[in-house]
Image: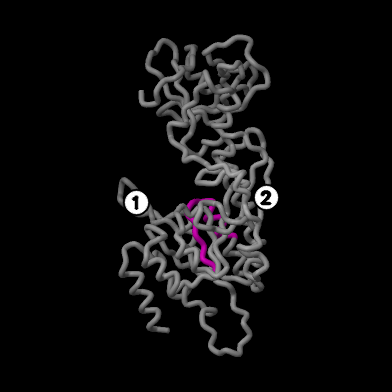
Amino acid sequence: RHNRHQHHHRIASSTSSIKLQSRYHVRSFSSTHLHSSSDDEPTNEKARILFLGTPDVAATSLKTLYEASQRPDSPYELVGVVTQPPKRRKRRGKEIASPVGLVAEELGLEVLCPEKARDKDFLDLLEEEVKPDLCVTAAYGQFLPKRFLATPKFGTLNIHPSLLPRWRGSSPVQRSLEAGDNPVGVSVLFTVSKMDAGPIVSQQSHAIDANEQATTLLPTLFDIGTQALLEAIPKVIAGEITMENAQEQDESLVVETNMIDASEGQLFPERMSALECHNRIRGFSMWPGTFLYFQIGDDETPVKVKVVESKVLEETADELTRAIVRGEKKKDGLRLVCGDGSILEMNKVQPATRNVMDAKSFVNGLQGRTVVWLSGLDSDE
């Protein structure tokens, strides 16, 4: 065993592509359940689970999964965590671990950070040392090669925040809000080589408020998905749920999510309805945000204004205008009339170089100047 640990250190230090960030790696990979000392002992070994994830929502899932694994009756244990490599801070050149990496460190779990999940050293380590029985992924952010998927005997389970096969791809919450979907939902599925195309283990629908934004919806869906995952894992380990008997996806209903481009953040009220603008504001609340150009008073320099919070008014305008005015009531927002006469109310905005402010603060800052929205301005200008 001593030699095996030395070998493990050697693998870890001989490659720059795998950064073993944690000082706990000897303990976690040489699990007490890895080798049984005699053949006639009862096989009450716990299944070995490897977790893959990167952002905050995945860090919360990791904590929940870890807590469940610590219960005495848990049929599984967490043997390690894979996450994206630390990012360098621009100013001081310091490396900052991902949210999942930080939580894994706190929990004393092995952390692997391959540059790419297809790196040979990483895959060797997976097969020879980690030996996962089941892998779990939550917003890991890398393509998993066939060799990876062939390693765990029970397969790889993924939390995907959409009602598959609708919204396969990298930004399902943003696209489902932009499209005005309600209910939205989350799927737990087996991972196959084709993106988000594996058979579905469970799926939960979630009804949302008309003003719900991606910023709050994403964590909610991951929480629901993590609970569904915890219910599924024991059944997968027991062989009750398999790749063969899980629900195949209907390929005729597939909708792919296109990668979001920052330029999509610009609103064009002359050709978008208030509802289309509002749904894009909700969907893009985390990134890239949504914006318009205003002309303030006689100043001919357009001001880029980010729209942070909005709603759609029930009434429509009698006549089209580009003037933006605040409603009469105390809590009313800035009202923008779209090309079809529908009215978007902007409750929180952020002019370039300023902080986020409510409509009242924005109007106070105008000191009586008028505001009109400008159309079709190229975002580079």
Quick check: 196 above or below 275?
below
Q: Label 1: which residue?
A: 88
Give the Cα separation between the discs numbered 2 and 1. 37 Å
**334 horizontally vs 353: left or right:** right
Q: Label 1: state its secondary structure.
A: strand
Classify mark 2: residues with Cα within 10 Å, few (<14), some (14-19) or many (20+).
some
> For residue 17, which quarter of the picture?
bottom left
Using the image as rendered, state which of residue 65 and residue 46 is in the foreground: 46
Amino acid type of the residue tagged 1 in the rendering: Arg
Place of residue 121 in the rendered image (x, y in percent of width and height, measured from the top left): 36, 67
Highlighted magenta segment, given as a residue range: 49-64
Using the image as rendered, state which of residue 224 and residue 119 is in the foreground: 119
Place of residue 253 in the rendered image (x, y in percent of width and height, measured from the top left): 62, 43
> For residue 7, which quarter of the picture?
bottom left
**12 horizontally vs 306: left or right:** left
User: Residue shown at 62%/59% (left/top)?
Assistant: 229
User: Residue shown at 57%/55% (left/top)?
Assistant: 198
Image quadrant where one finds the N terminus: bottom left
Residue 204: assigned label: 2
User: Residue shown at 63%/46% (left/top)?
Assistant: 163
Amino acid type of the residue tagged 2 in the rendering: Gln
